[in-house]
Image (cartoon, helix red, strand yellow):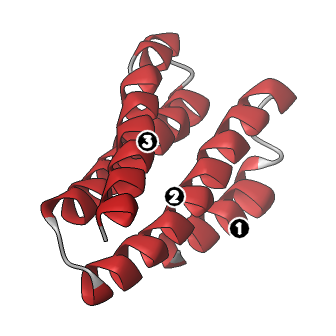
Amino acid sequence: MFIGVALGAFGAHALRSRLTPEMLQVFETGVRYHFYHSLGLFAVGWLAETHPSPWITGAGVAFVMGIIVFSGSLYVLAISGARWWGAVTPLGGLAFLAGWLLLLAGSLRA
């Protein structure tokens, strides 16, 4: 969450005058999903403490990988303008989806 706040502030203050509105929106999408899945990690942490299982651990790993790949690729795309990073982003989206499915499975098994 700390990194998400720092990147959000960086985007709002340092990048607003340097990026096109389109690329600023791309950066903000990365921050938004970073936050959503950081909150998901709180659920993972609670469930891992109360009902430890490989499903819950896998959800946490998938969320972290999703943040790195999905949000990270959007951050790099926005700052660098290298559009090929957009091809990497869906892999992070798949990690997010896997994380939610694993969290659901772990919750149901708990």
Q: Residue at x 80, y 25 (%)?
A: 22
* Residue placed most toward the observer, 100 or 6: 100
Q: Amino acid at mark 2?
A: His
Q: Secondary structure at mark 2?
A: helix
Is residue 32 shown left or right of residue 44?
Answer: right
User: Contact (CB < 8 A) between labels 2 and 3?
Assistant: yes
Q: CA gap, disc 2 to disc 3?
A: 8 Å
Q: Is residue 88 above or below residue 71?
A: above
Q: Amino acid at mark 3?
A: Phe
Instruction: Read off the residue under disc 2.
Output: 37
* Image location of residue 84, percent across then percent down: 44, 11
Q: How many marks?
A: 3
Q: Is there any visible trace of residue 91 in the rendered image? A: yes
* Image location of residue 21, percent across then percent down: 85, 31
Instruction: Read off the residue under disc 1.
Output: 9
Q: Amino acid at mark 1?
A: Ala
Q: Is residue 7 above or below residue 102?
A: below
Q: Secondary structure at mark 3?
A: helix
Mark 2 or mark 3: name the one nearer the start of the chain. Answer: 2
Badge 2: residue crowd in 10 Å (few <14, some 14–19, many ≥20)? many
Instruction: Read off the residue under disc 3.
Output: 96
Residue 35 found in image quarter: bottom right
Badge 1: residue crowd in 10 Å (few <14, some 14–19, many ≥20)? few
Residue 20 found in image quarter: top right
